[in-house]
């Protein structure tokens, strides 16, 4: 195997690694330009027989692809969910109903229903909240919601 064909296989492997990395990585089109640059470098190295020309083509093609895909990536990222809106944090700001009273003593959680889900909950300022009271989720700490009553008359 000569030098150019060895480099062509290396560029092909690099393209595969970047391509698989793009599929596994969160985000939009970060590794794809480099996969494209490596694939073009592989083809260039085979066509010209020069690993140095392949390297130059990789750098130029990767930069061109990177800057060409940035506007598309930004547009796709605009619609991505906010980090705070993932997992239990998606409940912050939502309203629920207490199923059991929530004690003012920290650690004595009550139960809150938010949509179809039931969660353990503590009161935000350490105030007691009656059962069947409407509450707003203000924080998530571990597996517990931190809530505060929507109306002052719901305290007990």
Image: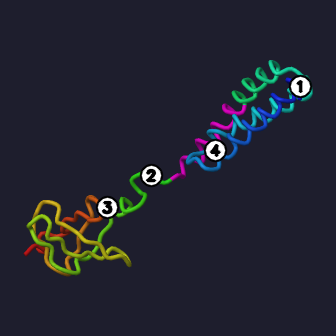
Mark 4: which secondary structure? helix
User: What crowding class fits label 1: few (fewer than 14 Cα within 10 Å), some (14-19), or many (20 or more)?
Assistant: few
Give whichever of discs 1 and 4 has the lower sequence position. 1
The x, y position of residue 153, in whole percent, is: 11, 74
* Residue 70 lies in the magenta stretch: yes
Highlighted range, magenta: 65-80
Report crowding for label 2: few under 14, some 14 to 19, many 20 or more residues within 10 A (C-alpha): few
Q: Nearer the viewer, mark 1 or mark 3?
A: 1
Q: Is residue 52 above or below residue 66?
A: above
How far apart are labels 2 and 1 at the CA level? 51 Å
Task: Judge depth for marks 4 and 3 and give the one in front.
Answer: 4
5 vs 32, left or right, is right
Tell which circle, 2 or 3, labels the residue nearer the N-terminal end.
2
Cα–Cα span, label 2 and label 4: 23 Å
Q: Position of residue 55 (x, y in %)?
A: 76, 22
Judging depth in this view, the residue of 7 and 64 nearest the camera is 7
| Disc 4 to disc 3, C-alpha distance | 35 Å
Looking at marks 2 and 1 on the same chain, the residue that comes earlier in the sequence is marked by 1
User: Residue 67 sits in which quadrant?
Assistant: top right
What residue did someone put label 4 on? 21
Quadrant of the rendering where the C terminus is positioned: bottom left
Q: Earlier in the sequence, mark 2 or mark 4?
A: 4
- Disc 2 is placed on an element classified as loop
From the viewer's perspective, is the residue at label 2 or at label 4 nearer? 4
- The circle on residue 2 is 1
Q: Earlier in the sequence, mark 4 or mark 3?
A: 4
Q: How far is the residue under mark 2 from the one under mark 3?
A: 14 Å
**Residue under pointer 3:** 93
């Amino acid at each position: 195997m000569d030098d150019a064909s060895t480099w062509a296989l290396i560029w092909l492997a690099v393209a595969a690694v970047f391509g698989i990395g793009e599929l596994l990585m969160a985000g939009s089109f970060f590794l794809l330009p480099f996969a494209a640059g490596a694939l073009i470098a592989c083809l260039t190295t085979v066509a010209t027989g020069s690993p140095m020309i392949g390297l130059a083509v990789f750098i130029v093609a990767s930069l061109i692809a990177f800057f060409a895909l940035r506007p598309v990536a930004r547009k796709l990222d605009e619609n991505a969910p906010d980090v705070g809106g993932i997992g239990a944090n998606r409940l912050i700001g939502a309203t629920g109903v207490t199923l059991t009273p929530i004690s003012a003593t920290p650690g004595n959680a009550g139960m809150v229903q938010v949509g179809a889900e039931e969660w353990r909950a503590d009161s935000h300022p350490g105030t007691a909240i009656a059962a069947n009271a409407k509450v707003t989720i203000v924080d998530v700490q571990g597996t517990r919601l931190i809530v505060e009553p929507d109306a002052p008359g719901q305290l007990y």
